[in-house]
Amino acid sequence: MTSDKTIDAVLVGGGVMSATVGALLKELEPGWTIEIFERLDDVALESSHVLNNAGTGHAALCELNYTPQRPDGSVDVSKALKINEQFEVSRQFWSYLVGQGHFASPREFITAVPHISFVRGDEDAAFLQKRHGALRDQPLFEGMEYSQDRAEMAEWMPLVMAGRDPAEKVAATRSLDGTDVNFGALTRGLLRLMNRAGGVRVHLQHDVRRVRRQSDGTWQVTAKNHATGASRHVRARFVFLGAGGRALPLLLNSGIPEARGYGGFPVGGLWLVCSNLSVVERHHAKVYGKAKLGAPPMSVPHLDTRFIDRRRGLLFGPYAGYSTKFLKQGSYLDWPLSVRPGNVVPLTMSGIHNVPLVRYLIREVLQSSASRLRTLQEYYPEARAEDWEMRMAGQRVQIIRKDAKTGTYLQFGTEVVNSADGTLSALLGASPGASTSVPIVLELLARCFPQRLSSQAWQAKLSQMIPTFGQSLPSDPALCRRIRHETSEALGLAR
Ligand SMILES: Cc1cc2nc3c(=O)[nH]c(=O)nc-3n(C[C@H](O)[C@H](O)[C@H](O)COP(=O)(O)OP(=O)(O)OC[C@H]3O[C@@H](n4cnc5c(N)ncnc54)[C@H](O)[C@@H]3O)c2cc1C
């Protein structure tokens, strides 16, 4: 079926990223017509599904990979400040949505859960203490506590401390500002908002196969309906490729020169999920450790309280898995078909330059159940195999490209790629992910709609939805405290 009209926007994929693009566009341009194509039977069934990600509201409160140690031993907190500020931007937009009545309660998608960093050994304890010293005076990290006191730590995280060797040096920091986020529920809330606004159609079971530029500068999007076998063709002035792992092949096929050189390799994930409710009830925190040598940042082990439909859960992981699929429900041909003459060199060189990562992945994939239990016992010494079940997490695609200036092969956390005229945009990569979806989409809007963004109408609306829009939080302690207080109240996180 071909639609004769040219619509304003097509969003490919029904995850949290497309939903955030759609919700923001609908708030900024209520009259726009938007179509969303999702290949599965429902939205938010891939990485955005509550069981496919860890649901950590990434604010760099506990994730040690955002505060690397410099060669002189000092701790670089610049990335942590940026991520914390970005999460605060997401919190503001979500607070606005709650205030507009798009969620019956913020508890549908966000819950306060303390964030703890936990380390073992003298060297890592010294690092953690330095990290705490560098962050504690930053208004965004106010209230973060440091402890080497085993009794205090046992109060913070009883499962982690019980049965632990008393001779082992351990240390932890705790922030009570941490959160657990159900990104699946958030996605559905964002789509509700769009549907209420009108002019939006969501096509489930529609797999987008082709995105082609037309002579008039618009894009023709072709999607196959799995249920009927029919194809739907639609013309759009703007296309967002929010297809998770599949955004990369769609981008490469779009033919835009900006896509050249991007490659990716998939990293699967596995969780151990606790099935013993009496164990689940004894833990109330997200406890993040230090990544093993060579491990990608996305594989930092953590013992994690989750809230799923307001019920408490407990998981540990992720363990890296391997599959050539770009989506959990993807095809084994995803990765081989994404290798092109334009990206084969970056992919190969990145592998050669990342021997510790390759070694780490091989070790992880070959791990036995007993070895996985031993890793869990580093965090929860009294863990018993019978209380835990292995489950597959979502699939991530690590993005690689040659840096034109330095000639090195870079791996990206999250990368927005767009055509020069701003009519097509894609989101690649995995981390820090859904938590920073709002600032990521704001960056995308700035690149694709620069004139509209500078208009008075968009500026006013953005300031209404995100009160600190255009301002710097770390450099304004009073603003920082005020906004943290306001979003905590609006999202039901206040202590
Ligand atoms: C193991 C793991 C742990 C994570 N932990 C966290 C965390 O703690 N905190 C955090 O903030 N983030 C975390 N993330 C990252 C977060 O889950 C992602 O950043 C986020 O869900 C990505 O959303 P998305 O909309 O881009 O992708 P997805 O949710 O994967 O959505 C993409 C959608 O596109 C659809 N699609 C694909 N191809 C097509 C096509 N051709 N046509 C139509 N539809 C298509 C898919 O079916 C899917 O529904 C984690 C991810 C993983 C895998």
Image (spheres, rainbow, N blue to C red):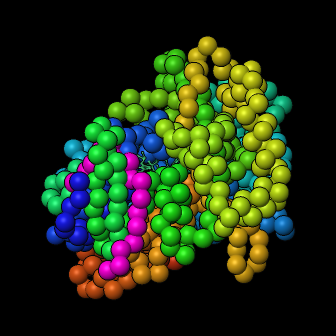
Q: Quadrant of the N terminus?
A: bottom left
Residue 128 place in picture, x, y as percent? 72, 52
Residue at left 21%, top 44%?
104
Q: Is residue 35 left or right of residue 13?
A: left
Residue range of the region highlighted in magenta in the rendering: 201-217
Q: Is residue 206 above or below residue 263?
A: above
Q: Is residue 104 left or right of residue 148?
A: left
Q: Is residue 272 above or below residue 286?
A: above
Q: Is residue 117 left or right of residue 330?
A: right
Residue 232 place in picture, x, y as percent? 28, 53
Residue 395 place in picture, x, y as percent? 56, 43
Which residue is at the far top? 386
Is 438 or 168 nearer to us in this picture? 438
Q: Is residue 442 above or below residue 161?
A: below
Residue at left 56%, top 32%?
392
Q: Is residue 199 visible?
A: yes
Q: Is most of the magenta stretch helix, strand or loop?
A: strand
Is 272 or 96 nearer to us in this picture? 272
Residue at left 59%, top 44%?
333
Residue 28 place in picture, x, y as percent? 25, 71
The answer to which quarter of the image holds residue 67 is bottom right
The answer to which quarter of the image holds residue 11 is bottom left
Residue at left 19%, top 68%?
5
Q: Is residue 144 visible?
A: no
